[in-house]
Image (spheres, helix red, strand yellow):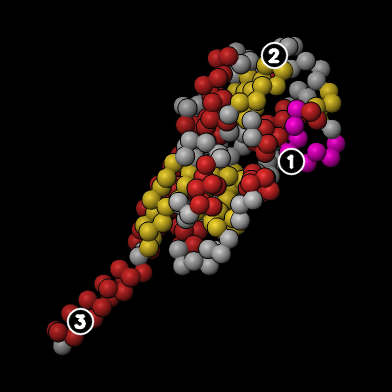
Amino acid sequence: MKKLMTLVSVLALGAGAALAQDIRVGVSPGEHAEIMEEVAKIAEPMGLNIDVIEFSDYVVPNQALADGDIQANSFQHRPYLENQMKDRGFDLVEVGTTINTPMGLYSNDYASPADIPDGSTIGIPNDPTNGGRGLLVLQQLGLIQLAEGTGLVPTVLDITENPKDIRIQELDAAQLPRSLADLDAAMINTNYAIASGLNPKTDSIAMEQNSPYVNIIVVRAGDEDQPWVKPLVEAYHSDEIKAFIETKYHGTVLTSW
């Protein structure tokens, strides 16, 4: 009987080892990286070992995924993914939602959008979807008006009214926090704000409202039924991760589940 129990234990251990999988997940700095590190802790007892790979910009994670250097990424919202696939021909698919991070307007010199004077320079991200998002927030705040029908990806060419004669400067999203000293204000994504030491709740002078930019977990087309996808999404959507996000970010990062 003892030998039989030992044999069963060995077989169980072997089965567990066979089920264990290693994957590499690409993230951007800030909350996406911090949350995925916590997801990795939840996923490990489920037999999924997640190696969190941090990228410093928004372009490389999708290229790395398409090239097979990583198995999934978690850093982008749907409009950005759609634009990347259209422009670069990536064959990628969404397998789960993650968080929503309202974009904020930041300034070292002014306490509210109304205080921004005529002729000021405001920075926005230089990629089409986040740049367009920044312009839409500036419209929400009444600083500019955009042409109708531009959807979620307006450009500076779509500005129809600019009563304060504001100059829009397009910069790499990751550089915007460090460029605040040279700008009157800047539209900054929450992950880069947090990574640079800014607190979106206390340091922003305005925040995006009613955002459609929910973030997602993305894999290569054809991999959506791989056995590691379900535990990855389940670990992310766990009560433990929801509690972590609510405790750490105090409402500046919102869960989608």
Disc on res. 178: none
Q: Residue at x 14, y 84 (%)?
A: 2
Q: Which residue is mark 2?
A: 120
Q: Secondary structure at mark 1?
A: loop
Question: Which residue in the protein does label 1 denote?
Answer: 152
What is the C-alpha distance between the residues marked 2 and 1?
24 Å
Secondary structure found at label 2: loop
User: Which residues lie in the magenta part?
Assistant: 148-156
Residue to which mark 3 is pinned: 7
Residue 165 image point, x, y percent:
78, 15
Is residue 103 in the magenta section?
no
Labels 2 and 1 touching (C-beta < 8 A): no
Q: Main secondary structure of the magenta part?
A: loop
Asked if residue 94 can be seen in this view, the reply is no
Q: Is the residue 21 above or below the residue 248 in the image?
A: below
Tell me if 133 is positioned left or right of 8 in this view. right
* Quarter of the figure with the N terminus: bottom left
Q: Amino acid at mark 3?
A: Leu
Q: Earlier in the sequence, mark 2 or mark 3?
A: 3
- Residue 177 picture location, percent across and down: 53, 24
| Callout 3: SS | helix
For the C terminus, the quadrant is: bottom right
Q: Is residue 161 left or right of residue 80?
A: right
Q: Residues within 10 Å of mark 1 (few under 14, many from 20)?
A: some
First in sequence: mark 3 or mark 1? 3
Give neighbour class at mark 3: few <14, some 14-19, many 20+ (Cα, 10 Å).
few
